[in-house]
Amino acid sequence: MLFIRSLLFNIACYGIIAVGCILNSIIGLFSREATIKIWNHLFIPAVVLSLKYIAGITIEIRGKQYLNQTTGIYAGKHESAVETYVLSNYLKRATFVMKKELTYIPIFGWAQALYGMIPINRSAGSAAMKTMLKKAQELSSKNRPIIIFPEGTRRRPGDTPVYKPGVALLYQHLNMPVVPFASNTGFFWGKSSFLRYPGKIIFEFLPPIQSGLSKKEFMEKLQNSIEEKCRELNMETIKNYPLVKDKLVQQ
């Protein structure tokens, strides 16, 4: 049954994404704003509904009081494709910092570029950081929240954290609060996994880290906030869904 539900969901989800990419690759040539609205008011909600009614995965948002629809940097755990597909259902105009290689994928990459993502070439060193900052400043000035995954890649629940300095660059130069967030997505939609396990995905947004800290102070506070809350969510998830406890990396 798990395999069948996962199969049906994957067909529905990737079908929705494919249609969305094709449509928005055309519409985006004429109106970038229309592309944002279509994604976040039509296609992304359709993915969330398919998660619920096909895969049996519901989503709970905690800390909604920390969400601002027109500004802010949101930095959190990246355990699954879920974050990139559904977070803009709750931050409607959000843009993501994403690896540049994804923009090279025909149709999919074009749609991401027209939507207004922030691509980063991770092999380009300081030049990549400057390009990322310039694009982030441009989009932030257009009242678009920025979502970044400080570790730069997907990690398994409980894995040893490896935070990178890109988020600190945004924090220092954009001069705006960073809202940390934790999640438990890796238990239900794991990295490189075909199966989608039913249960409740939780995104928990935490009190903003206000501007003014040094780079070291900021990175320590960010990592401690996210990792501590992730540990709590991991334990809550295992208690409520013992069948997925093997997804947790044991240190």
Image (cartoon, rainbow, N blue to C red):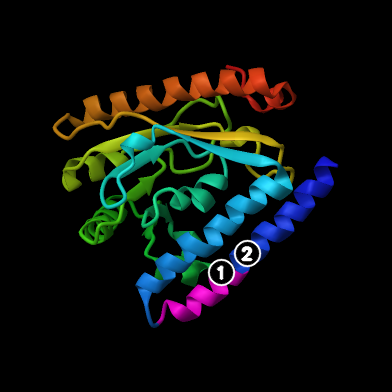
Which disc is residue 163 wearing?
A: none
- Asked whether the viewer can see residue 123, the reply is no
Q: Is residue 154 above or below residue 220?
A: below
| CA distance for labels 1 and 2 | 6 Å
* Amino acid residing under circle 1: Gly
Toward which corner of the image does residue 116 lie, by quadrant?
bottom left
Q: Residue 50's x, y, as percent?
A: 66, 53
Of residues 191 and 28, the one drawn nearer to the viewer in this rendering: 28
Secondary structure of the magenta portion, mostly?
helix
Q: How many marks?
A: 2
Q: Residues within 10 Å of mark 1 (few under 14, many from 20)?
A: many
**Residue denoted by label 2:** 16
Corner quadrant of residue 20:
bottom right
Is 234 left or right of 165, judged from the image as shown? right
Residue 185: give x, y in percent of width and height. 57, 36
Q: Which residues are magenta?
A: 19-29
Compared with residue 248, is residue 92 higher up or lower down, i.e. above or below? below
Pointer 2 local density, CA inside 10 Å: few below 14, some 14–19, many at least 20:
some
Q: Position of residue 246 (x, y in %)?
A: 70, 24
Asked if the residue under mark 2 is in contact with the one under mark 1, i.e. CB atoms within 8 Å, the reply is yes
- Residue 234 visible in image: yes
Dot 1 corresponds to which residue? Answer: 20
Choose between 245 and 53: the one closer to the eye. 53
SS of the residue under disc 1 = helix
Give the camera-side residue of 4 and 118.
4
Q: Quadrant of the N terminus?
A: top right
The percent position of residue 107, horizontal first and vertical second, equals 55, 73
Q: Secondary structure at mark 2?
A: helix
- Residue 62 horizontal side relative to residue 246, left or right: left
233 vs 49: above or below: above
Q: At 77% across and 54% down in the image, what residue appears? A: 8
